[in-house]
Image (tube, helix red, strand yellow):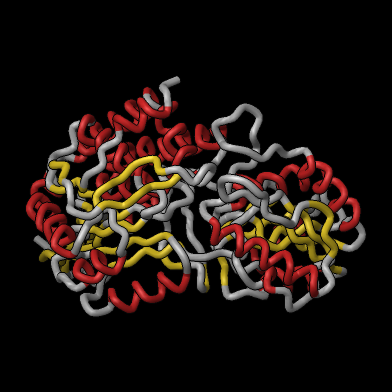
Amino acid sequence: MISESALLAKIPTGLFIGGEWRSTEGTIDVMDPSTGAVLASIADASATDARAALDAAVSVQDEWAATAPRTRSNILRKAFDLMQERRDEFALLMTLEMGKPLAEAQGEVTYGGEFLRWFSEEAVRITGRYGVNPEGTGRTIVSQHPVGPCYLITPWNFPLAMATRKIAPALAAGCTVIVKPASLTPLTTLYFAKLLEEAGLPAGVVNVLTTSSSGAVTEPLLDDPRLRKLSFTGSTPVGQKLISQSAKNVLRTSMELGGNAPFVVFGDADLDAAVDGAIAAKFRNVGQACTAANRFIVHESVAEEFARRVTERVKGFTVGRGTEDGVTIGPLIDDRAVTKATDLVDDAVSKGATLLTGGSSIDGDGSFFEPTVITDVKPGSNILREEIFGPVLAIVPFSTEADAIRLANDTEYGLVSYVFTTDLARGQRMIDKLETGMMGLNVGVISNASAPFGGVKQSGIGREGGFEGIHEYLSTKYTMTPVA
């Protein structure tokens, strides 16, 4: 495997605008969350740079939209192949800048790559319809067209997959894009842009802005009528603000926002499967995922045994730098995340919850927090209302199915839910009654490039992935022609 220093030397550090890498006067330090050391210093974009990126995207929009679907498909497929060749490099890079264990970073390369492969195939399947209207007075043509230049804002927790999940369908649909990665984990996106260059993507089709001031680059872009779409993954408060800012130019928007996922375990559940699912749904990515199970709602008949089993598993985790052999839990992204996890656990315990393991930050370099299990969490605890984004598993007992549904839906969020039961009729009732855009029924990991990802309520609008994902970047045109 390539050394850390050799890999970091390969990563571009400038802005990528119009096919050129540009330096800036100011820079941003990218930190290793496991040590606090600086990994790289990168360009810090301004409003002027944002306008230049939009100029570049607009200048080639018509040409890219007119590019043959097969050509767009082949470029995405070439990018997929190149990513597989460099999967070790992308995995190590994500571990360095985000902290996740190397094995999980490898998994993200697989997952993120699948969006390139999936949408390379969808690029040649954009269709419309044709027919005679019911009155017989005309013929109806319905066609699909790229929405135009897009602004894509990606989060820090899945630096590769969130970039490919947005960029791939946009390119497949014939849209040019400006990408703004999170300032905490921008290196993966910069390396991906370099890969797209090598895959043959024309200059200006993808532009990358890294910045320490999101508002400085976002506001002028949203204020410019040439921009036609915004896609954002991040917190609900920020998403709400962006939706408001997008209203002026009536932008097409896609929002994948916060979550507060319930993980419901009924008394008839296969407990072995439920525990496996719980570990995957809670501790993948060190708990820093919008799909992470947040509230474990467990039937009182099995709550004690479920708590015992998950606690035994959690006590067996190894905490450390993600590059080290055997590590299963890496650092949180920064010290603020550690403080948040500490405060949520302390609040729950102060209100009557029982701490079974963990519960504290870990002294030393880096932003580490002990893998934690708490049970008998009481109503009114902050941990039941806020997205944890950390390795904390919180258990709430329930007595009836109606109670489970009430507790699961008692949140303004509605991204994903998890249900474990061997009763098929009950499983169907949960599909119908739980207010989420996605559900894992007897599984703890649901994300897949071929499936529509997204939520309801305060968790967002629109879908990413699946054939639904490309339609977020297409506008529908209806044409009437006379009957011959």
Asked where in the image residue 247 lies, by quadrant, the reply is bottom left
Left or right relative to 186: residue 17: left
Give the position of the N terminus as an image quadrant. Answer: top left
Q: Is residue 428 above or below residue 456?
A: above
What residue is drawn where x is 57% and y is 67%? 414
Image position, residue 473 (x, y; %): 28, 56
Left or right relative to 199: residue 286: right
Image position, residue 385 (x, y; %): 65, 72
Seen from the viewer's position, the closer of residues 67 and 191 is 191
What residue is drawn where x is 14% and y is 53%? 57
Left or right relative to 112: residue 302: right
Give the position of the C terminus as an image quadrant. Answer: bottom left
Asked where in the image residue 76 lies, by quadrant, the reply is top left
Q: Is residue 399 above or below residue 264?
A: below
Left or right relative to 356: residue 246: left
Question: How many circles with numbers are drawn on the protein?
Answer: 0
Image position, residue 136 (x, y; %): 21, 68
What residue is drawn where x is 65% and y is 37%? 328
Seen from the viewer's position, the closer of residues 418 and 10 is 10
Q: Residue lying at the far front in this picture: please name it.
A: 364
Image position, residue 320 (x, y; %): 63, 38
Q: Residue lying at the far top in this picture: please name it.
A: 1
The answer to whether residue 47 is seen in the rendering is: yes
The answer to whether residue 468 is seen in the rendering is: no
What residue is drawn where x is 28% and y is 57%? 211
Seen from the viewer's position, the closer of residues 155 and 132 is 155
